[in-house]
Amino acid sequence: MTPRRAIATLACLAIVALVAIGVAELPGGSPAGESTGPRLTASQTSVLLAGSPPPLAALHEQGGALLDGGGRTLQARLAAFKGYPVVINKWASWCVSCREELGAFQRASAEYGRRVAFVGLDSGDTSRSAGSAFLESFPVSYPSYYDKSGRLGERVTDSSFTPVTVFIARDGSRFIHQGPYPSVAKLELDIRRYALEG
């Protein structure tokens, strides 16, 4: 290969690499959760959650389910977690930020699910089937409660915005995070700070 041809080939490869990097950095360019790392398989999640205490194991058995019941049912469920920290994530299938942060919740709930109760709240989806389809496309290890009107979500999170995450420590103290989690690391930091250490 001549020197001129070698230089031209290297220049082409450099341009291809720059284009690939640019495309990877485009906002909204990745499917749900991919910005927070690769998805966990069901078997990986099962290994991480093996040996969970009964109240938390019951949550994992309903992983990815969209449950009915309203505020009283949710409050009864939360009462069953006495002595355990709780993380409640309010989301909706139409919410782009919710879709982007779901990978962080999938990984963090598998990593901390033996010590922390995770619960989802599908708040404001006009159709139950939209929320169910969303959960089927990106399963998590905990159930969500369906809140069509959005009123329950507003009561639980003190906010009409989505996504919102509520951390409830063992002593009952609460911390509310408005907006999405851009990474697993940031979510796990808040789990340790506001749920486990609160």
Image (spheres, grey):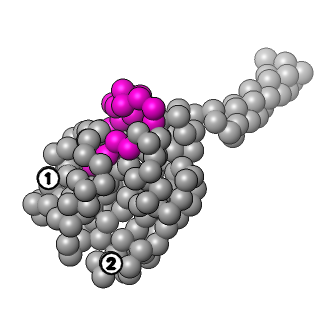
**Where does residue 188 sit, x and y in percent of width and height?**
43, 64
Q: Nearer the viewer, residue 169 or 27?
A: 169
Q: Nearer the viewer, residue 20 or 109?
A: 109
Residue picked out by circle 1 = 58
Q: Left or right? Give the position of 96 relative to 24.
A: left
Dot 1 or dot 2, earlier in sequence: 1
Q: Which residue is mark 2?
A: 172
Range shown magenta = 125-147
> Residue pushed farthest right?
4
Distance of label 1 from label 2 (alpha carbons) = 21 Å
- Image quadrant holding the N terminus, namely top right
At mark 2, the secondary structure is loop
Specify the amino acid type for callout 2. Gly
Relative height, residue 68 to residue 74 (above, below): above
In the rendered image, which quarter contains the C terminus? bottom left
Few, some or many C-alpha atoms within 10 Å of disc 2 (few <14, some 14-19, many ≥20)?
A: some
Question: What is the x, y in percent for residue 158?
Answer: 50, 63
Q: Residue at x 36, y 50 (%)?
A: 120
